Image: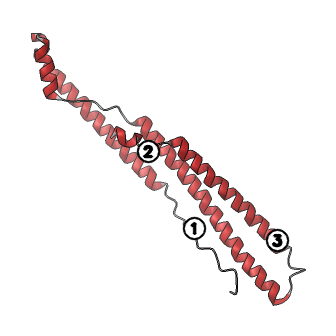
Amino acid sequence: MAAEVERDNDPVAAGEVGARWDGLAKRLHESTADLAALIAGTHETWQGPGGDAARASLGRAAQWLSHSAAVSASVGTAVGAQADAAARARADMPPPVTYDPAAMIRDAAGAGNILVLAGLADEMEARRAEAEAARQKAIDVLRTRDTALHGHVPAETFAAPPALGQA
């Protein structure tokens, strides 16, 4: 289980991906504002049905840009939160505790000390309990991580770009 939280787990790289999504969202918001300003400035020069059609077309583009910016921001936030969840799982994962009764018996018998053999049952029980506690903690860490990862999947999706010709 410890290998599962280590494998392909690079929170720094994931954080950089999230930051790139945030940067895209910012640029899309800026483009939306620029397009809205362009549309607002056309009322005097673009008149009649042609002007109205052009503004309507640009308005659809602005709405799509705005939605795409919101989805990009949501993806950036989600990637950052998922990176945090993965990093937390890596930090919280207990080290594996080896419990090999046969090896413990061989080691105790090989020690040649009767006191080691006499205490073996208690030592084996303690090691088994320690291994089980570490296993349960690892299961909890994985469940917590998986719940967090699934909880940070964005609900929104990117829409297809609008048709900008005849409506």
| Picture residue at 41% right of the left edge, 51% below the top | 147
Q: Which residue is drawn at 55% across and 41% down?
A: 12
Camera-nearest residue between 152 and 75: 75
Point 63% across, 65% down: residue: 68
Q: What residue type is labelled 2?
A: Asp
- For the N terminus, which image quadrant? top left
First in sequence, mark 1 or 3: give its number: 3
- Would you say residue 91 is visible in this rendering? yes
Pointer 3 and pointer 2: residues touching (CB < 8 Å)?
no
Percent coordinates x, y for residue 157 in the rendering: 54, 66
- Residue 104 position within the rendered picture, expressed as x and y whole percent measured from the top left: 16, 23
The kind of secondary structure element at disc 1 is: loop
Mark 1 is surrounded, within 10 Å at the Cα level, by few (under 14), some (14 to 19) or many (20 or more) other residues, namely: few
The earlier-in-sequence mark between 3 and 2 is 2
User: Which type of secondary structure does the marked residue at label 2 adopt?
Assistant: loop
Give left or right: position of 11 versus 72: left
Task: Give the residue pinned by disc 2.
Answer: 8
Asked whether, in this view, residue 44 is left or right of residue 145, the answer is right
User: In the image, which disc is placed on residue 158?
Assistant: 1
Mark 3 is on which residue type? Leu
Residue 119: image location, x then y, percent: 14, 17
Element type at marker 3?
Answer: helix
Mark linked to residue 38:
3
| Residue 4 versus residue 166 in the image, above or below | above
Residue 97, compared with residue 154, is above or below; it is above
Q: How far apart are marks 2 and 1 (CA)?
A: 27 Å
| Residue at (78% x, 70% y) in the render | 36
Quarter of the view holding residue 133: top left
Residues 3 and 32: in front is 3
> Which mark lies nearer to you, 3 or 2?
2
Say few, some or many: other residues with alpha carbon within 10 Å of mark 3 (under 14 / 14 to 19 / 20 or more): few
